[in-house]
Each structure stands twice: as C-alpha cells, then as structure tokens.
Amino acid sequence: MKVLFVNPACLDERITNDDATVVPIGIYYMAALLLEKGFDTQILNLAALDTNKNETVNSNLNPNLKSDALQTFKAAIKKEQPDLIGFSVTNPSRINAVACAKAARTILPGALIVFGGPAPTFMPEHLFKVCPEIDIMVKGEGESTILSILEALVETLAKTKAPQSENRAKNLKDRASFNNKSFNYAFRNIKGIALWEEGKLLETVPAQPIQNLDSLVHPSKYFVYQHLSMSRGCPGKCTFCGSPKFWGSNKIRRHSALWFAREIMGLAQKGVTHFYISDDTFTMDREQVIAFCKILVDADFQPTWNAISRVDYIDSELLFWMRRAGCIQISFGIESGSQKIKKILGKPISNENCIHAFSLTRSHGIMPRAYFIYGSPGETPETIQASCNLMIQLAPLSAVFYLLVIFPGTHLYQNALQKGLVTNGIWDKNIEDLPWFELDDTLDFSRVKAFGDRLRNCFFENISQFVQGIDLVEKKVLYPFHADFLSRLAMTFSHGEYANDPRIKDSDKIAQHLFAKALSYSPQPRAFMGMAMVLQRQKQFSKAADHLARGLEHFPGNKELCVCMGVCLMNQARFKDALAFFAPFKDETGMDHYINICNSQEQTQ
C-alpha cells in the first residue's frame, strides 16, 4: 500500500516564502507513523518548488526547480502510483489542492483521495461541492484517523480475490469517486471524518485527541525539517484565529521536555542547526520549557531557535534558560495599541504587560519581534496612532504588520456569516483569504493601506532609537550570548534586511556601534568579521585587517575570519600574504576563485 502526502501550493506568490512553503508538521507526524507501520509513504511539497529549502522531503519528488505545481503533481503520481493521496489543505492552498484532486481522479481513478487540515475541518461541505472527486475529509488532528482510514482501505480491498490493482479497476471504473453509500460504509465507523453521500454531508463523531503526544513516532527518524512544535492547542480566544476550534478545545497537550529535546537533537544529527518552534504559546508551561532548555544546556548542545509566546507568559528565569539553550528570537502578538481594538480581536492584554515583556526579553539578549494587525473592525487613524505610540514604547527589534484577513473557523468569520456579511460561496472565487475591510463600510483599500504604511514607517524611522536603548542584564554567564545577540543584530544593519532600507539612516554606523558593543562583552568571530567588512566597505583596509588579526588571535584557524582576512589583503594588493589565509581551505568550494586571482597577480608583479 503506497501513500503520498501532498502540501499544495498557495494561490498567490509570496514576497517572502518561508511560512507558505513549509511542510506542515502534521504531515511529518502522519508520514512517520505510517512508515513505522510498514506503509510505503512519501511527501510531495508543491509549495516549495520555486525555492531551495533545508526541509528535505524526498529528492525524487521535490526538484529544486521552478515548475508548475499541477504538472509536477501529475508527473509524481504517474510515477509513484499511490493508493492513497492525502492533501494538507489551507484556504490559501485549496485551489491547487482541488486541481490536483481532479487530476488524480483522472490519472488514478482507484486512488483514495483524502483532504485534511484547516480548510476541510471548517468547510467540508463546500469542498465536497466544488470537488466531488474528494473521498474523505479528516477533521482536526490526523494521526489516528489516517491510520484508521488506511486500515479500512486495506481490509476492503482484501475482501476480493483479485490482485489489488485489479480490485481498483473493477470496483471503481464506473465511479468518479468513492462517495457512494456502499463504499462509504467501510469508513463510517472511523471517528473524525466527513463523507459525501447522496448529495449530503455525513460527519462522524469527533476523534478523541491523542493525550500522550510522546506516544507518537519521532518524525526526525524519517525526515529532516526545521519547524516543529512541543504542544498542541491554545487557550486563547483571539477572534482572528482558528487554532482552538481546529484542535477541538482550549486544552493544551504537550510533549515531554525529554521527547522534544530528543527530536531536536535527532534533527541536528542530520545537519539542521536552526529551528522554528511554532507552538501557539510555547512558554505557557514554563517548567516544561525550562526543563527542555536545561536538557540542551546539560548536553552542551546549542542549536539556535525562534519561538512564539504571549507577553503574559514571560519571566526572567525562563528567559535566562531559553537564551542559554539557544533561543535568539521570540515573537509576540501585540496586535494593536488600542484597547478597543484589542478587545475586538480577543487580546485584552494591557500595554504595560507588553512593554515589560519586550524589555525583559531584550535584556536577556533575545530579539523581541512584534506582530501588529491593522484594518480591524473599528480601526481609525486614532487607533493606528495608539499602535504607533505603543510600538515606540516597546522598542521592538523586528516587527511584522498584517492586514486583518478572516477565514472559516474564526470568530470574526462566523460572526460575519451570522450577520449575512458573507457566505461560504465567497470561496468559489480564486482568492486566498478575505480582508476584513471588504466587509466593513467604514474601511476601504486605500484607507487600510495607509494604516499599514504608517505602522511600517513608524517602525523603520525609529529602529535606530530602539537599538540605542538596548540594556542587557549583567550576568556574566550570559556575556557570550550578549555578544552573539548584538553581532547578529549588527549584521541585519550591515548586510541584512535593514542594510539598504532608505527609511533607516546611517545603517553602517548602527552596525559598527553594535559590533563594538558585542566585543565589549566577549570575543565573537561574527563581530570581528562584521566590523572588518564594514570597514572594508569604507575602504579602511588597514583597520579592517587589525580587527581580523585580533579575531584570529581568539579564534585561530576560523574559516570565515581567514577568508575575510584574505580578501582584505587582496584589496591591499598583498596577494602573497592573502594566499596564506586561503591555503588551509583550498579544497573547499569557492576557494579556487580567490587562490587563482592571487596566483595570477603574483606572477604579474
């Protein structure tokens, strides 16, 4: 029995692709479970066809070439001939998922087509109507349900005496799909699914959530990925988020600290060095998080990782251990500076709590990132000004600004349905999401765009002030981490996202300040190299060489410092001296370019 899980492509092209192209963690859990049970299982990530990602799924199915997602899918199923094709579907990816399902029914009429994820969980009837080729929809958590579906499929096919491939051809040649009464009978006892029978939606009782998450197979045993989660669920009541409804309750279930640490260590052994911990509120169980951090610290294992949290679940001890264990960024949902808007969005947290959390996080050498939402019900220039005022007090070192869009499964969408502002028919259109302003007579595109521009300008025009206000805790054990934090931040100004933004003045000057401050805490190779690179850009090659020499005194043989020193010496026409720094790495990719130039120049001198 062959299984193919598919992560469909989103409808719209992304400016930044990271979040949209990542395979959902649930697919990895399900695929690992099925592999453990002996099913031939693969993953096809159609969303990442245009990018080069660390998330290696299956090199045969995921070429790193620009390609049409539908055509790639067709080629994959023709080659692999899966018996079950499972799609993880969101609203933005539903168009591609439906197109692939229709193609699959034509190419492999006997394949079982299963949809799971947020879109099928919240609007199964709509999807069955637009795509009768779908056989089963999985609602909510999928591991136990997909295994039950496969076991039922195997049992059903085994009831006939002909080979499996002949079964499919015989039983399905006169059907467009499995959605008839006789075949549905095989799946009716499976909890947590939806079927389509005689033009009506048939939903079984909800599946029981897996209480012991540690009982699940480690996905890292079979796959390599960066995005993972320690818990499932969220107790929050954000009106723009469907997470609690997707998981079936507000109750939180968690992996143990040891299980989660082992998962990260397993991925690290496969070459992953940075992780994105995507829990809705990672720090809610502080004791478990501290225990997880201590396991990493005691093992002398320090990957870097980002997390997401709430401002009311942060304290000094927690941040101390998170930083020591490699956390470099925490994202907080601030949403707005207006208490009126916060109440509408279901985030009635005081601005004072927000300011305190940002100060505390920053002081431990962790970058606090702020999420803001604009274009909410009741949004006005005054509420946007309240957000700007709060932003200046928060002094975030990174910020993301989202236009409010609503989806099925959220309170805002359900409220709009009840008021007749929208119907599920809206999703017949080729759209990814539904911006709130399209339903609100007091808002329009130009007005809302101006709100977003105002917030972004406020951030970029004040970022240098935010940097100047960094005040780190005086704990010597954290000094090397402070140096790491400051040098990373400096790099965003010298060579990263802030380097060429016209709204940021004197980015090189800010970078030099941060590099120097980093070195005041502890020797740090990135700080030595970054300072030298800025100086070289300013044609101050001798000063750059001095910084690199000091760096090499602390970190002899460091490749990045040696290469940077070699380039610096080349800029001073000291080609023979430069060769001495390139030579130890002569067999590594890219070194021959520098070595050839140096040899050529030496011969002409």
Image (cartoon, rainbow, N blue to C red):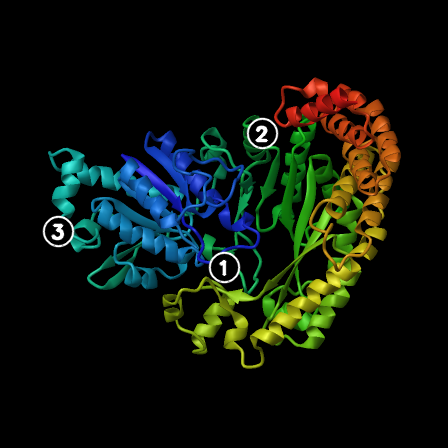
Left or right relative to 558: residue 30 = left
| Residue under pointer 1 | 242
Which of 156/599 is in front? 599
Amino acid type of the residue that numbered disc 3 sits on in the rendered structure: Asp
Q: Position of residue 279 (x, y in %)?
A: 57, 47
User: Helix, strand or loop at disc 1?
Assistant: loop
| Residue under pointer 3 | 174
Q: Position of residue 560 (x, y in %)?
A: 73, 29
Amino acid type of the residue that numbered disc 1 sits on in the rendered structure: Gly
User: In the rendered image of this protein, does residue 419 appear above or below residue 309?
Assistant: below
Q: Residue at x 66, y 20 (%)?
A: 586
The picture quadrant where one finds residue 328 is top right
Q: Position of residue 81 (x, y in %)?
A: 26, 38
Which of 513/141 is in front? 513
The picture quadrant where one finds residue 147 is top left
Give how far apart the Cα atoms at labels 1 and 3 are: 39 Å
Pick whichever of labels 2 and 1 is earlier in the sequence.
1
| Residue under pointer 2 | 268
Amino acid type of the residue that numbered disc 2 sits on in the rendered structure: Ala
Give how far apart the Cα atoms at labels 2 and 1 are: 32 Å
